[in-house]
Amino acid sequence: YKDCRQWIRISLQGLKKLFMDFQSLDEHRASNATGTGLGLSICKRIIENMGGKIGVVSTIGQGTTFDIELTTFTHRIKN
């Protein structure tokens, strides 16, 4: 799954703390964005506990892309 937001640019400093608990990005404070700073850290824990990975790349003029990889498996129970 990829989510690309063309209008969001995250600084290198922001990328370093993006998945940390109770962190908000300095570059978005003036945009009336509110929140606890827990959303992405909770998502990261859930995804990693499911054996997956989450990553982010942000490029000036191109926006920010979040990549989520989840492993799927089938478990069969024999009777």
Image (cartoon, grey):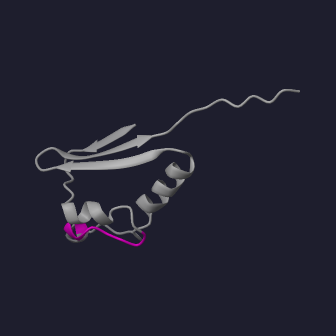
Q: Is residue 5 left or right of residue 2?
A: left
Q: Nearer the viewer, residue 78 or 29?
A: 78
Closer-to-camera residue (12/42):
12
Name which residue lies at 27% across and 67% down. Answer: 25
Q: Which residues are magenta?
A: 21-28
The residue drawn where x is 56% and y is 51% is: 49
Quadrant of residue 72 within the rendered picture: top right
The N terminus sits in image quarter: top left
- Residue 10 sits in quarter: bottom left
Q: Is residue 52 above or below residue 46?
A: above
Residue 34 at what x, y percent from top left? 34, 69
Of all residues shown, which one is farthest toward the right? 79
Residue 61 at x, y percent in the picture: 10, 47
Classified by dominant secondary structure, the portion drawn in magenta counts as: loop
- Count all numbered tags in the image, as a single digit: 0
4 or 34, nearer to the observer: 4
The residue shown at (39%, 68%) is 37
The C terminus lies in quadrant: top right
Q: Is residue 58 above or below residue 19?
A: above
The reply to whether the magenta stretch includes residue 65 is no
